[in-house]
Every structure is written in C-alpha cells, then in structure tokens.
C-alpha cells in the first residue's frame, strides 16, 4: 500500500465510510482507509480531531462495460 503523504482530520460523527465517500467518492474504499490506519480501526465513530493517513487508491474509470453498482448499500435502504 502506498500512502499519499496527506492526512485527513476527522470531524465529530464521521466514520471510515463517510471519509471514504468524501475523499474518494465511494464508501467502498473504507477498507483501504482501515488498512492504512490500523491504530484507529476499532473506532466506529470519530470524536473529531483524529488524523487519518490517506492511501493512494486507484479509482477505475467507468468504461460502461461493468454492471452499475447501487447508489446505496442494501442495508442502508429504507
């Protein structure tokens, strides 16, 4: 894993999912954030002020051949 050299200061109430959505445009990159920040991986909701190391994530371009992923995770539907 390559780190970007940049950090992200979390706000109160943020989660790894919400940071991934904010930084990378998709919650599915939360796993990369967790792997890059093992000391913080047991925190479900940040209190604010935590600094996350941001890994370099290769985001594929939409080529139109792949099946579109849903906009929301199924467990968040409702």
Image (tube, rainbow, N blue to C red):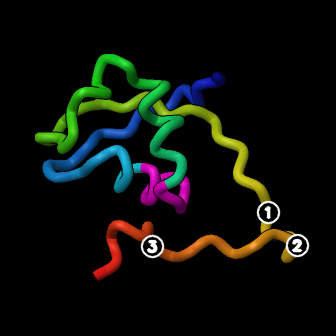
Q: Which residue is mark 2?
A: 65
Above or below: residue 51 compared with residue 70? above
Position of 10 with respect to 52 (left or right) is: left
Residue located at (65% from left, 24% from top): 2
Residue located at (28% from left, 48% from top): 15
Q: Quadrant of the N terminus?
A: top right
Above or below: residue 6 compared with residue 59? above
Residue located at (21% from left, 33% from top): 43
Give 35 or 70, whichever is nearer the viewer. Answer: 70
Which region of the structure is painted magenta?
20-27
Q: Which residue is mark 1?
A: 61
Q: Which numbered tag is attached to residue 72?
A: 3
Secondary structure at numbered mark 2: loop
Query: Are the two marked residues, 2 and 1, in contact with CB atoms closer than 8 angstroms?
Result: no
Is-magenta flag for residue 43?
Answer: no
Q: Quadrant of residue 56 in the image?
A: top right
Q: Quadrant of residue 40 in the image?
A: top left
Provide residue 51's location: percent of width, then percent of height. Answer: 30, 31
Position of 60 with respect to 30 (left or right) is: right
Give whichever of discs 3 and 1 has the lower sequence position. Answer: 1
Residue at the extreme top of the image, as rendered: 39
Q: Quadrant of residue 10 in the image?
A: top left
Q: CA distance from mark 3 to mark 1?
A: 19 Å
Give whichever of discs 2 and 3 has the lower sequence position. Answer: 2
Provide residue 64's location: percent of width, then percent of height. Answer: 85, 76
Secondary structure character of the magenta stretch overall: helix
Q: CA distance from mark 2 to mark 1?
A: 11 Å
Q: How many marks?
A: 3
């Amino acid at each position: 894993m390559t780190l970007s050299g940049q950090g992200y200061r979390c706000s109160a109430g943020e989660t790894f999912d919400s940071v991934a959505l904010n930084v990378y445009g998709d919650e599915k990159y939360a796993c990369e954030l967790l792997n890059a920040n093992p000391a913080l991986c047991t925190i479900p909701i940040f209190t604010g002020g935590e600094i996350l190391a941001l890994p370099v994530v290769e985001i594929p371009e939409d080529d139109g051949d792949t099946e579109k992923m849903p906009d929301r995770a199924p467990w968040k539907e409702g």
